[in-house]
Amino acid sequence: MNTVSEKKPRLTTSAMIASIAGEDQRVKAAPFGKALAELAASRPEVVGMTADLAKYTDLHLFAQACPERFFQMGMAEQLLMAAAGGMAKEGLVPFATTYAVFGTRRAYDFIHQVIAEEHLDVKMCCALPGLTTGYGPSHQATEDLAMMRGIPGLTIVDPCDALDIEQAVPQIAAHKGPVYMRLLRGSVPLVLDEYDYKFELGKAKLLRDGDDVLVISSGFMTMRALEVAQSLEADKVGVAVLHCPTIKPLDEAAIVEAVRYKHRLVVVAENHSVIGGLGEAVASALLRHRVQPASFQLAGLPDAFLDAGALPTLHERYGISREALARRIKSWLDR
């Protein structure tokens, strides 16, 4: 029988806000804040705004580099978005940051009416997307994509890692019109540099090919898909991974090309509810293009209010850890 000292250590409260990076995984610190500060050096119209969360969205690095272009709006997300719209009308390019739950649920009408209806150049970069915090439904933005996909003319980006974020920042700044980007903050994994990858707004990228399974993914679930693909090689299972960092407009041509004429299981993996996110967008695209995969499954978060707790525990519980995703794919293949 195991002694107390042999048992795994109990996860502490800090695990509720832990980095999604695994042990010994390569990371980059605050890629968003650094990329925005670098961009601002050559783009004087770029301003940074936040709702009392500069440190927790990495915008504090921009504030240090460009204090005269940094605006702290306090705990007032509706004011944040309305003011960002006003600045955009004057020719500035505001990057507005907060947590995704506050930027979407609390300020939705202001984004819809002030920013999107007038197609203003506001870039909303929102941290803690999906299940990247263990603080329960008040902080878990598991439905943000479903909400934002319904806004006409809004571009939506869900980056995988530090490289994705670094390369996305100047491209969304150059894009004319409003953008919502899910933001990974703090120590962010570095994965995609090993796959000869470059972010291109509006484009999906096939990172690896395989004969048995195609995983279509966004956000950090692309990292999970790549990990699973490597682990399933030992079982002679070939897993292809198509990374979709732009959720809207979706690269339907790349998705159709990856699915058509290939007899393999298609899995959409996303850090979001199975309602209204990437999975349903992909399913809709395939139906409209009359493309039918051999089998189709969603590996997303359940249509539920999720528990609070340590992130590793929650990722395993809700099927988005590396081990859980591998088990799900194996079970679908066995069918």
Image: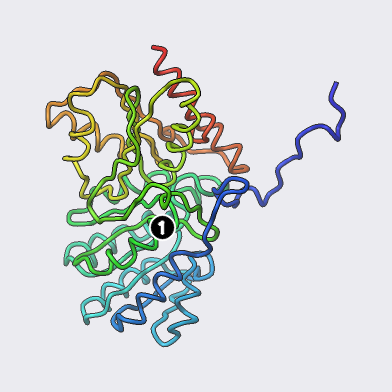
Instruction: Report the residue that reaches farthest toward the left.
Output: 289
| Count of all numbered marks drawn on residues in the image | 1
Quadrant, the N terminus: top right
Q: Where is residue 144 in the image (x, y as percent from the top left)?
A: 36, 49
Residue 316 makes an appearance in the image? yes
Image height of 187 relative to 75, above or below: above
Q: Would residue 28 appear left or right of 203 to someone viewing this image?
A: right
201 displayed left or right of 63 = left
Task: Give the image location of residue 153, x and y in percent.
Answer: 18, 56
Q: Can residue 277 be seen in this view?
A: no
Q: Which amino acid does label 1 sit on?
A: Leu
The residue positioned 20% from the left and 44% from the top of the image is: 251
Tell me which colouring the rendered structure shows. rainbow
Out of 152 and 62, give the one closest to the viewer.
62
Residue found at x 35% / y 37%: 208
Q: Looking at the image, is 288 positioned above or below residue 109?
A: above
Check the picture and name the quadrant holding the C terminus.
top left
Secondary structure beneath dot 1 equals helix
Instruction: Name the residue located 32 percent from the left edge and 75 percent from the top edge.
Output: 83
Q: Where is residue 101 in the image (x, y as percent from the top left)?
A: 43, 54
* Residue at the top extreme, as displayed: 335
| Of 280 and 106, the residue lying toward us | 280
Label 1 neighbour load within 10 Å: few <14, some 14-19, many 20+: many
Q: Residue furthest bottom?
A: 68
Provide the residue designation for mark 1.
Answer: 163
Rendered location of residue 17, percent (x, y)? 59, 52
Residue 87's place in the image compared with 212, above or below, is below
- Does residue 94 appear to the left or right of 32 in the view shown? left
